[in-house]
Image: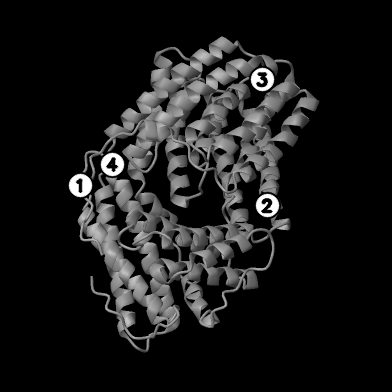
Amino acid sequence: MSSALPTSSPRRLPLAGALRLGRPSDIWFKPALSVVAAVAPPNLLLVALGRLDLAMYTMAGSLCALYAHNRPYAARAKALVWVVLGMLAGLAVALVAASLTTNAVVLVAVGSVLAAGQKALCDATRIGPPGHVILIFVSSAALFVPQTLGQVPGHLALAAAAGVWAWLVGMAPVLVRPHGPERRATAQALRAAAAYAEKPDAGDGHPRARADAYAAVQAAWQSLLAAGNRPSAVRRGLERLVIRAEVALAAPADADPARLRAWARDLRGTGPVPRPDDPRAGADELLGVAAERALAPRSLWSRLTGLTPIAVRTALGCALAGYASLAVGVGRPYWALVTAAALYQANITLTWSRTVQRVVGNLVGVLIFAAVAPVAHLGPLALVLCCLAFNFGAEAFISRNYWLGSVCVTPLALLVTEFPGYQPTGELVADRVVDTLVGALAGFAAAMLVTNRRAGDRVEEALTTVGRAREGAARLLADPHAEPAALDAARRHLAAALVGLRATADAAAGEWWLRAVPQERVVLAEQSGHRTLAATVRRRGLLPGTSTHTEDVRP
């Protein structure tokens, strides 16, 4: 074990690193194709009817197809229902407010409160990409569309119909690959375990790689647990493979990376799930999974209470951005509002990176819009086709880096404003540039003003959680008659606590105006926790040549 412990590094705001391109998502084409399939039929129908001015409302429902692509289909069905309902609720509030007043000051206030609520709910439910940004974009834009109360039910009906179609598009792949999301999550866990096991001096010498690998395993467990309680041979096979990834992380020196990668490759498509040819891979390994499924999840309220600083940042930043936009005379303050709302991440450092990405992406995007506008102005069909192309491009590129996706999102947002009628390109470009800069400055200023003072407290809470989970696992290890189900559940509980500790420590380290994160205690907790995980693996006899004697798990 390395004796050197990392210390808190100086808090710097990255610039070039924020624009570095990463690898595309494994399923980048799924949201890209889904959004095209969800947007195209309603918009083309409106073109045929000569009512493209109503496309903003159908787009609201169609964009729900962007969500929940990583979730098993049982969980995806429920998640998409809530996304559609949430979209309709935000749209309803915006349309009613727009019908009752045209006072921009009041409308910006309504939009800011809506944005804060949408941000908090998306973070608390962990709905995943694209998160709150799409919801805020739709509701904020609707606030500034001329409206009467009598029109609201019809416009909501259009959004609801498109939302139902988006739900069908999102669920359609279940007919071809019913266990696709779980298989992908399991394959990712196996690949992550293999990559970690291949590192020289795997263990305490690579805490970041270990944390990333455990996060992939934890994501696989969450995917399998979200798939429902109905027994399935495929699911049991996937659970056994995740256990093998878990075992490889706990004892990397005894792992076979080539075998792990081979299992991951075999999970492609719809073929049979590979079964580890280990006599220890019996049904008793899955008892801990059943025990974990019986645990009640945390309530939504308990998850919301820790998000107050983020919600306040969002409300304040959106209000400042909207009012600053009005002050400089821009006629579309919702662009500045959405820009500010899109910035807020888990901490100040990540928020700064998103600010850089947003500004660069938007500025490049307005140039692309200026070049494409003459083609889009050829007719309603050309306008819709251009929007579809940018919809696809945004989802295809955004997993490489947010700024690259914004290069397509920006002209898409500008083209949507032209559904009711064409507007001067120069005016749109100038307004968008001003609103981008105003929104970014105001949004980041709000993030600096509203500090997340509880971030340090959450590190202490996470350390306590890890300590209790490790002590619970150690007690079971000391008991020669401990139930296998209890030991397996304790192992997964400790692994989840360690993943949470690393995420909490990273989030707190990126905050400003806070006391230094206790890095030495975090590292020591991780080291002792992972040694206990290795001991549980050996105690269960999941490694060749291991016995069931109690290991020394002292820190």
Q: Cα distance, mark 3 to mark 1?
A: 53 Å
Q: Which residue is mark 1?
A: 516
Q: Position of residue 7 (x, y in %)?
A: 21, 50
Marker disc for residue 308? none
What type is the residue that disc 2 sits on?
Met
Q: Position of residue 472 (x, y in %)?
A: 31, 75
Which of the two residues, 99 or 162, is positioned nearer the viewer here?
Answer: 162
Looking at the image, which residue is at 57% across and 29% down?
408
Q: Cα distance, mark 1 to mark 4?
A: 10 Å
Q: How many numbered discs, if any? A: 4
Residue 117 visible here: yes
- Asked if labels 2 and 4 touch by Cβ distance under 8 angstroms, the answer is no
Q: Which residue is mark 4?
A: 511
Marker disc for residue 420? 3
**Which label lies toward us, 3 or 4?**
4
Which of the two residues, 336 or 484, is positioned nearer the viewer here?
Answer: 484
Residue neighbourhood size for the residue with mark 1, other residues' Cα within 10 Å, grouped as few (<14), some (14–19), many (≥20): some
Quick check: 71 left or right of 42? left
Q: Which residue is mark 2?
A: 171
Q: Cα distance, mark 3 to mark 4?
A: 43 Å
Q: Quadrant of residue 531?
A: bottom left
Residue 25 in the image: above or below residue 153: below
